[in-house]
Amino acid sequence: MQITFYKYQGTGNDFVMIDNRSLSFPKEDTKLINKLCDRKFGVGADGLILLENDEELDFKMVYYNADGNESTMCGNGGRCLVAFANFLGVIKEKTTFNAVDGLHNATINADIVSLQMIDVENIKEKENYSFLNTGSPHHVQLVDDVTNFDVFTEGKKIRYGLYGEAGSNVNFVAKNDNGYTVRTYERGVEDETLSCGTGVTAVAIAMHKSKNTNLTTIPIKVMGGNLEISFTVDKDGYKNVFLTGPAKQVFKGEIVC
C-alpha cells in the first residue's frame, strides 16, 4: 500500500498528516501508525493525524500518539491540522472543526494559527504541583532549573508512579523574564517533546490559578520555539482559552507500507 502524507510541525511538535476524506486509510492498524511515526523505520513524528469529513462542521480531527493508539486532544496537532486544511482548500481564514474533546474554533493568518481550547473548570492544586485537563491530562510542576532538569527520568517517574497505567503528561516549569519556560514529558510518545500545546495551555492556567501570575495573556517558551496562551476568567473557571503560534508544512511524501 502506498500512502501519501504531509509532514507538519508546530514549534517542533511534529506530525504525519493524512487527508482521509475518502476513508481509505486503515486507521485500526496501530502497528502501521506506529511504524509511520517511527523515526528510524518510518516518516518520524510525535503523532499521526487524519483529516476527515464531518457532517456538520468543516472537518474532523482524528489523532494518534506515536505508539499507534488513538488519543486525547493535541493542541499543536490541532493547529497543524488547521494549517493543513487551509493548504488543501478545505477552509480559508476561519474554521470550526470536530475533535475528540468537542468543537474547536480557529483562525489562520500566514503560518500563525490560533486555536480555541476547551473551557477548564476543575484544577487540583497540591503542595508541589497542579493537575488539570485541557483536552488531555496534565501535571504541572515548578522547578528551579528547567534548562538542566532531567525531564525524561523525572517525567517518566511521575507519569507512571503518580498516575498509573493511564498516565498523565508531565510539565516542568520555570519563570522567565517574559512568561514561563516549559519542558514536557508526553505519554504515548513516552519521551520529552519539543513542544506540547495542551501542556503549555495547562501551565498558563495553572500558573494563574496558583497566583504565580495575574496575566491573562501568557507567553510560553518551549524547546521548539514560542507560543502564547490567552483566556478569560469567571466564577466558573477559564474560558475563551486560545493557543497561538506557528504551524508549518515541512514536506510532502509517499511511503510504501
Image (cartoon, rainbow, N blue to C red):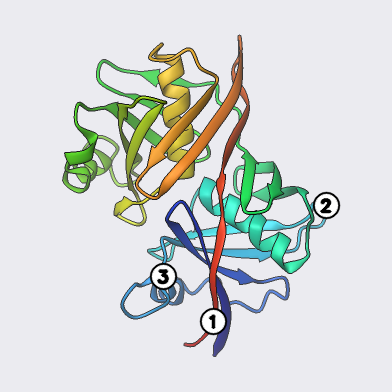
Q: In the displayed structure, does residue 96 sit left or right of residue 11?
A: right
Residue beneath the point at 36% across and 72% down: 38
Q: Amino acid at mark 3?
A: Cys
When asked about the image quadrant of residue 226, the answer is: top left
Residue beneath the point at 43% across and 75% down: 36
As measured in the structure, the alpha-carbon distance from the residue carrying label 1 to the one carrying label 3 is: 14 Å
Judged by depth in the image, the label closer to the viewer, 1 or 3, is: 1
Relative depth, front residue between 199 and 244:
244
User: Which residue bears the numbered disc 1?
Assistant: 253
Q: Is residue 122 above or below residue 13?
A: above
Relative depth, front residue between 135 and 28:
135
Q: Are marks 1 and 2 in contact (CB under 8 Å)?
A: no
If you read the primary sequence from the N terminus, does the residue marked by circle 3 or circle 2 appear first? 3
**SS for tag 3?**
helix
User: Which residue bears the numbered disc 2?
Assistant: 56
**Residue 257 percent location from the top left of the image:** 47, 87
When asked about the image quadrant of residue 83, the answer is: bottom right
Q: Is residue 61 visible?
A: no
User: Which residue bears the numbered disc 3?
Assistant: 37
Q: Amino acid at mark 1?
A: Gly
Residue beneath the point at 44% across and 36% down: 200
Q: In the displayed structure, does residue 194 sit left or right of residue 85?
A: left
**SS for tag 1?**
strand
As measured in the structure, the alpha-carbon distance from the residue carrying label 1 to the one carrying label 2 is: 30 Å
Q: In the displayed structure, does residue 137 sit left or right of residue 172?
A: right
**SS for tag 2?**
loop
If you read the primary sequence from the N terminus, does the residue marked by circle 1 or circle 3 appear first? 3
- The residue sitting at the right extreme is 56
